[in-house]
Image (spheres, helix red, strand yellow):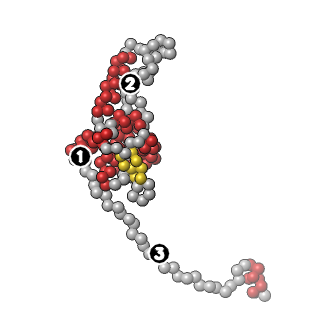
Amino acid sequence: MRLTTKGRFAVTAMIDVAMRQHLGPVTLAGISQRQHISLSYLEQLFGKLRRHELVDSVRGPGGGYTLSRKSEEISIADIIIAVDEPLDATQCGGKENCNGEDNGPCMTHDLWAQLNAKMVEFLDSVNLKGLVEQNLAKGVTVEEVAITRKPVSPLPVTAKPIKVKAPNSVFNLAQTLN
């Protein structure tokens, strides 16, 4: 099994949400800045996470994402499976046709199938709460983010235009010269 960027980013983003949701909904823009993950990529991942009911979205000002369950109830396997990450080390994808459609599994198929089972078992035993606690123990801090609003500046005062009594076209100009 090879964990791709998709799975790694999904787990990283979910840890970020779990660490900060006590402050309110966590924005994807905030996750993007802190974790250096593209905002558009996060939008794709969180769409899948929401469809698998791992996160809830909150709309409007002050909106963002929160975990839909307690952090101890969400395993890393849940996250990886939600973003369509295959957890399979076999060549055949578990279909037992490594040597072709009619030739059955390869000689090492059982080895890779057992490895798959152990990987899923391990990832299922690790939950978000444990990873949050690990990160906090390492010294990762969760900053209290104050919502900063741009100060509203008054509109600039513009002078009223001077009304000029002059011809407004070439034809009117010719009439005024005659």
Residue 168, image quadrant: bottom right
CA–CA distance in space, label 2 to label 3: 63 Å
Looking at marks 2 and 1 on the same chain, the residue that comes earlier in the sequence is marked by: 2
Residue displayed at 36% across by 21% down: 113
- Pointer 2 local density, CA inside 10 Å: few below 14, some 14–19, many at least 20: some
Kindly indicate whether the residue at mark 3 contacts the one at mark 2 (C-beta within 8 angstroms).
no
Q: Amino acid at mark 2?
A: Ala
Q: Amino acid at mark 1?
A: Leu
Looking at marks 1 and 3 on the same chain, the residue that comes earlier in the sequence is marked by: 1
Q: Which mark is residue 89?
A: 2
Quadrant holding the N terminus: top left
Label 1: which secondary element:
helix
Q: How far from the left and from the top, in percent, is residue 57?
A: 42, 50
Residue displayed at 35% across by 61% down: 147
Residue 160, image quadrant: bottom right
Residue displayed at 43% across by 14% down: 105
Looking at marks 2 and 3 on the same chain, the residue that comes earlier in the sequence is marked by: 2
CA–CA distance in space, label 1 to label 3: 46 Å
Residue 13, image quadrant: top left
Label 2: which secondary element:
loop
- Pointer 3 local density, CA inside 10 Å: few below 14, some 14–19, many at least 20: few
In this figure, what is the number of numbered marks? 3
Residue displayed at 36% across by 17% down: 110
The answer to whether residue 117 is above or below residue 171 is above
Tag nearer the camera, 2 or 3: 2
**In the rendered view, does 115 fall on the left or right side of 139?**
right
> Which residue, given by chain and number where applicable, does mark 1 sit on?
136
Q: How far from the left and from the top, in percent, is residue 96?
A: 44, 17
Q: Amino acid at mark 3?
A: Leu
The answer to whether residue 93 is above or below residue 48 is above
Camera sees residue 133:
yes
Label 3: which secondary element:
loop
